[in-house]
Amino acid sequence: MRFHNVPTRLDRYIFRQLFWGLIAVTTGLTALIWLTQSLRFIELVVNRGLSMLVFMQLTGLLIPSFIAVILPITTYVVIQFMYNRLSGDREITVMRAAGLSPFSLARPALAVALLATIAGYWLNLYVVPSTLASFREFQWEIRNKVAAFLLQEGVFTAISDKLVVYIRSRKPDGSLRGILVDDARDPAVHATILAESGQLLEGANGPRVLLINGSRQEIDRQTGRLNMLTFTENEIDLGDASGPEAARPPDMSEVSTAALLHPHPVFERDIPKWIAEGHKRLAGPLASISYALVALVSVLTGSFQRHGGFIRPFVSVLAVVLLVAFGLTIDGLAARDNALIPLIWGRTVLPGIVCAIVLFVPVRWRFRISARPSEPTAEAAAE
């Protein structure tokens, strides 16, 4: 009875190391990616006066999408590292000498990979679409509804990439003095607007500014002449959107998987992209199991080397890098031609099937081959 408990104890021993290693590596790599990606939004704090709390709330919504992308890779890294360490410490050798099969040795890693796959599906199907929808809604609100509150005295404030506003002074009641607006939102007309004073107003599509006693200057592209229009009152929309909040078109990253597989995008040309994205969500988490099997083949196959070796780990890392690069290429091609969608499933599932055959099937064939020689020998003796 005590002998039968040994594999269970070994399973728990290896599983604990893999599980906590996966948590640590995923957390560290996610923090690093969050730090690099959040720099894109630091200008909201520096130039637009947003608080650090709002910045953390905005960028924090991106974290689940980071985890969903890197989880298969961190699963591979942890399994490759932990099993290499066990092999270097001769623990794998002792376990083999105790009669454990490759499947018994691989069982803790497969359990961790299965947990990573379940977590990946939970993230891809539920968490990521919800958080990305909240992120884009929050970002849209900052760029449109909150735009008026971001105007600072004596600063050229970029409301969007094509709209810049400068004010000399601003009062608490919303009145402005010394206003300059550079408006390039209309590709056909690039206008520069000057006004002595103005007043912030709330519009249906976001904040507006009532300009008083000013001029609008435009360059006629056909004649090259400067056209100037003076006005007593004029209104300009500071919103970056072309319509109300309800008209904001959804991005394919924030809709449900069912909506991706049966798409109704704003532009009909995006239908292949949506369908490919839906299959990518469904197939992506399975990469955790495939990459785990690649690592197990690297560690649990081949002969034991006293001083270790770097060839098999190097080949394993190279194989995963090529699989990731190939997957990115396939995703791009399938988004253009949905006839290539089976390749999305193939590049995710096929490596795992091949590695499972290499790792587990030879053990069964070994028993079959060892049982066959007795049959021809008996026939030869009878003759």
Image (tube, rainbow, N blue to C red):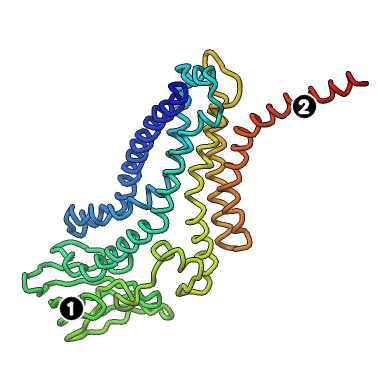
The mark nearer the N terminus, 1 or 2, is 1
Residue 372 tag number: 2
Q: Position of residue 88 (x, y in %)?
A: 47, 18
Would you say the residues marked 1 and 2 are in contact, meaning their CB atoms lie under 8 Å apart? no
Q: Secondary structure at mark 1?
A: strand
Q: Quadrant of the N terminus?
A: top left
Q: Residue furthest bottom?
A: 232
Q: Secondary structure at mark 2?
A: loop
**In the image, 367: left or right of 229?**
right
Q: In this picture, is 373 found above or below 24? A: above
**Nearer to the camera, 65 or 205:** 65
Name which residue type carries label 1.
Answer: Glu
Name which residue type carries label 2.
Answer: Arg
Q: Residue at x 22, y 71 (%)?
A: 145
Residue 42 tag number: none
Q: Position of residue 281 (x, y in %)?
A: 47, 56
Q: Residue at x 57, y 54 (%)?
A: 344
Q: In this picture, is 312 found above or below 257? A: above
Q: Residue furthest top?
A: 306
Q: Which class describes the residues within 10 Å of circle 1: few (<14), some (14-19), or many (20+)?
A: few
Q: Residue at x 31, y 76 (%)?
A: 246
How many marks can you see? Answer: 2
Quarter of the image where one finds residue 141: bottom left
**In the image, 125: left or right of 273?**
left
Q: Quadrant of the C terminus?
A: top right
Q: Residue at x 17, y 58 (%)?
A: 49
| Mark 1 to mark 2 CA distance (whole Å) | 87 Å
Q: In this picture, is 215 found above or below 374? A: below
**Nearer to the camera, 378 or 61:** 378
Q: Position of residue 90 (x, y in %)?
A: 48, 16
User: Which residue does the numbered mark 1 point to in the structure image?
Assistant: 202
**Nearer to the camera, 153 or 287:** 287
